[in-house]
Amino acid sequence: MTDSDLFATRWHAVRQRLIADQADALVLSRGSDLVYLSGYDAHALERLTAFVGAPNTDGIPTLFAPQLEVPLVTAMPDVFTISGWTDDQDPVAMVAEQIVGAQRVLVSDEMRADHLLALQSLMPDTTFVSLSASLGGLRSIKSDAEMQAIQTVGGLANQVAAQLQSGEIPLVGRSEAEIAEDITARLLAVGHETVEFCIVASGPNSASPHHHPGNRIVQAGEMVLCDFGGKHKGYCSDITRCVWTGDIPADVLATYDTLKKAQQAAVDAARPGASLGDVDAAARNVIADAGFGSQFIHRTGHGIGTEVHEQPYVTKDNTQVVEVGHAFSIEPGIYVEGKWGMRLEDIVVVVDDGAIRCSTTDHNLIAVRA
Ligand code: ZN
Ligand code: ZN
Ligand code: ZN
């Protein structure tokens, strides 16, 4: 498939969803949605870049870009028309003119407020709706090729998680930051092109879900929570595994058993037709029943694709339905302030009969000596 065919196919699919949503127009500004439909990764500057499509017409969408940045756009005349605007023109007025008469317009979440406010004031009778709120995100339903890409990159991160569990990565006596550097190098060595994040949280720091690895030296007999991921061919990995440096205390083991059951329950619940709220509840109920409800302090998961966090979100009240082609994390956690925290995370892709994990390394809390 040529790039042009790929983007034309994507627009065709998005167009059907827009029509079903009774949207008269779509306005994307810069960001991952723009890359998804046009291949163009625009600068994050104040000049407006906007991809404007009207699903109900036969016309192809228009990409409005600052004239001085037009040379950066790869032209695909079968996919979109390029309209360069100069500094003496008002690009928002040009967009408004393109979608004149539209009643319901979907806008990308990343659109700057100044641009949207200007567009709203030019089109006072139009309703502007968040794309993610209406469609659950543009990129939330993955193609077979994208699902494959997510499984492939998930497999790469999985290799590093296995190295962590095997004791191959020295822990005791090293700082969190040193370990994070080591894991980063390993993520690159197994084939990621970039590392997007690497959390190494030891001892009491593991009770802080998004801890930044620092100078704390890992001790014997404590929790080490590692949550990391990178990109390969544009798609992201994200995995969390915990290890214990020494013999695992019985209460920690018992609590981890609850966590593991909760994660499995959510994977089992992630079937087409269930709601994302059902998936969250599956994990949350197991943890609450064991008495740790108030210590599971975040959502169960997030969508993943070209961004580490994207639609759909696995949250308590999300009534959105799980669909074939969804890819998201399932990562319940239990955090005991001042002592330790634990989280178990896999990315899953949803197929007809349920969710497939992209990572298969041991789901137990592993005792490592180093
Ligand atoms: Zn997170
Ligand atoms: Zn993670
Ligand atoms: Zn995650």
Image: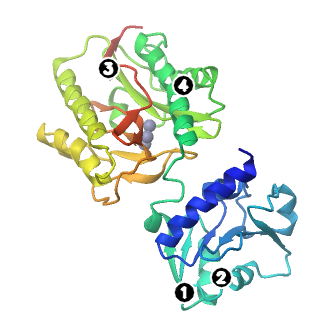
Marks 1 & 2, CB-CB < 8 Å contact: yes
**Nearer to us: label 1 or label 2:** 2
Q: Is residue 200 visible in the rendered structure shown here?
A: no
Q: Residues within 10 Å of mark 3 (few under 14, many from 20)?
A: many
Disc 1 residue: CB within 8 Å of ligand 1: no
The residue that mark 4 highlights is: 156
Element assignment for label 3: loop
The mark nearer the N terminus, 1 or 2, is 2
Disc 2 marks which amino acid? Answer: Ile
| Residue 285 spot, x, y in % from top left | 17, 44
The residue that mark 1 highlights is: 126
Distance of mark 3 from mark 2, alpha carbons?
Answer: 59 Å
Q: Is residue 100 above or below residue 240?
A: below
| Residue 323 spot, x, y in % from top left | 39, 51
Between residue 341 and residue 142, name the one nearer to us.
142
Q: Is residue 107 above or below residue 117?
A: above
Disc 1 marks which amino acid? Answer: Thr
Element assignment for label 1: loop
Disc 4 marks which amino acid? Answer: Leu
Disc 3 marks which amino acid? Answer: Glu
Between residue 302 and residue 173, name the one nearer to us.
302
What mark, if any, has residue 222 been given in the picture?
3
Quadrant in the picture for residue 291: top left
Quadrant in the picture for residue 52: bottom right
The residue that mark 2 highlights is: 99
**Nearer to us: label 4 or label 2:** 2
Position of the C terminus by quadrant: top left
Element assignment for label 2: loop
The mark nearer the N terminus, 3 or 1, is 1
